[in-house]
Image: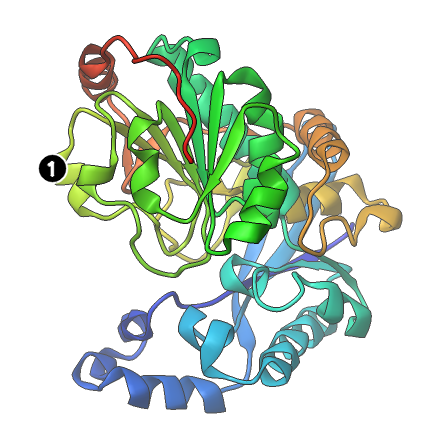
Amino acid sequence: MTRFGFIIHPLFPKDLQRRYPIVKYLPDRVIEEFLRRKKPVVASSITGVRSKTGVETEGWFIGLPLVPSQMVNGLPIDFVYQRISECVEVAAAQGAQLIGLGAFSSVVGDGGVTVAGRSPIGVTTGNSYTVATAIQGTVRALELLEVDTKNSTLAVVGATGSIGKTCAKVLGREFGNVILVGRDLDRTQAVAAEIPNASASINIADIKIADAIITVSSAGKELIMPEHLKPGCVVCDVARPRDVAARVSKERPDVLVIEGGVVSVPGNVEFNFNFGFPPHTAYACMSETMILALEGDPSLYNFTLGKDVSVEQVDLITKLAEKHGFELAGMRSFEKAVTEEAIERARKARVVAPTVSRVG
């Protein structure tokens, strides 16, 4: 049996109050200093993952005691790499042959390349399967809303990142118009140059003409507000923390926001840790790690690394997911199941699209 580890971490300092109730009375800077001094630990064991081929795997969640703000710009990158490498060492000591980098541990620095170079076991970011499921979920939602993609506009927020770039390249082929939004205009224009009918922007307001939006920024805060959305549009939010503001769920019942990368895991999996999903489901990045463990091919353990995800990687992990019985779970929005009523509201809100135009 090939075993795996997967790194998890708090998204916000106050998340620690689930384990340490006193935290709610402390300022964030005190909590962050406490986290900086802590070492990684085993957060829980994962059991019951069973492929439809009959192969099984088990693993561990490894707790990385850092929040995104510390990893991105609050601490020296070498310190962050060291803490992530310590997580790898904890997993290896448990008997894991590979580890997945969850949430911001896959974003920081060079996307796992340095960590993999220091690691005694395989390392993957999980981004290939995250791309695959983001596309699958968006396509499913568009079909339910009866969107004619050839006469519609796709927007990708965070388009220069590994997930956003590949989503844009793969899904952009189906749309008449593509808007890429990034923080750096030159880098965003470079991606746009690779995609037919694509334009680049650094202005989030430009997504207002989009019929479909995939958002996967590493901003670590809410970017997309109610006023940024076209009636009847589909938004697939892959980012954690979310890019889509919580206000959208209350103020814009006419749009369909779905969570990207929610996957049904085969077998009778027990995570022994509550990360807000229904039983037997997981994030796509977690699922990629489990898929590779079930496949048991050491040549695939360092599967998705760096800032680029190839179409070939997406195709391969999709085939392996199907082989082992992983599939997109029912659509969810703001941690709740998407209802038929929500789909119908968004469908009715759709209006005849104006003539496709390019931004910029």
Residue at image position (64%, 83%) is 78
Would you name the residue on which mark 1 appears? 251
Foreground residue, 75 or 14?
75
| Outermost residue, left side | 251
Give coordinates of residue 125: x percent, y percent.
Answer: 64, 54
Q: Is residue 350 visible?
A: yes
Q: Using the rendered view, name the quadrant where residue 68 is placed.
A: bottom left
Residue at image position (33%, 37%) is 206
The total of numbered circles placed on residues is 1
Taking 319 as reference, is 33 left or right? left
Residue at image position (73%, 31%) is 320
Taking 50 as reference, is 33 left or right? left
Give coordinates of residue 306: x percent, y percent.
Answer: 70, 56
Give coordinates of residue 218: x percent, y percent.
Answer: 46, 57
Foreground residue, 82 or 288?
82
> Eyeballing the image, is 337 above or below 309?
above
Foreground residue, 57 or 180?
180
Q: Callout 1: helix, strand or loop?
A: helix
Q: Which quarter of the rendered picture does the C terminus lie within?
A: top left
Q: Using the rendered view, name the quadrant where residue 256 is placed.
A: top left
> Eyeballing the image, is 113 above or below 266?
below
Q: Dot 1, how many residues are within 10 Å of its Cα: few (below 14), some (14-19), or many (20+)?
A: few
Q: Is residue 48 visible?
A: no
Give coordinates of residue 85: x percent, y percent.
Answer: 68, 76
Q: Using the rendered view, name the quadrant where residue 342 is placed.
A: top left
> What amino acid does circle 1 point to?
Glu
Q: How is the image coloured?
A: rainbow
> Eyeballing the image, is 182 above or below 90?
above
Foreground residue, 197 or 156?
197
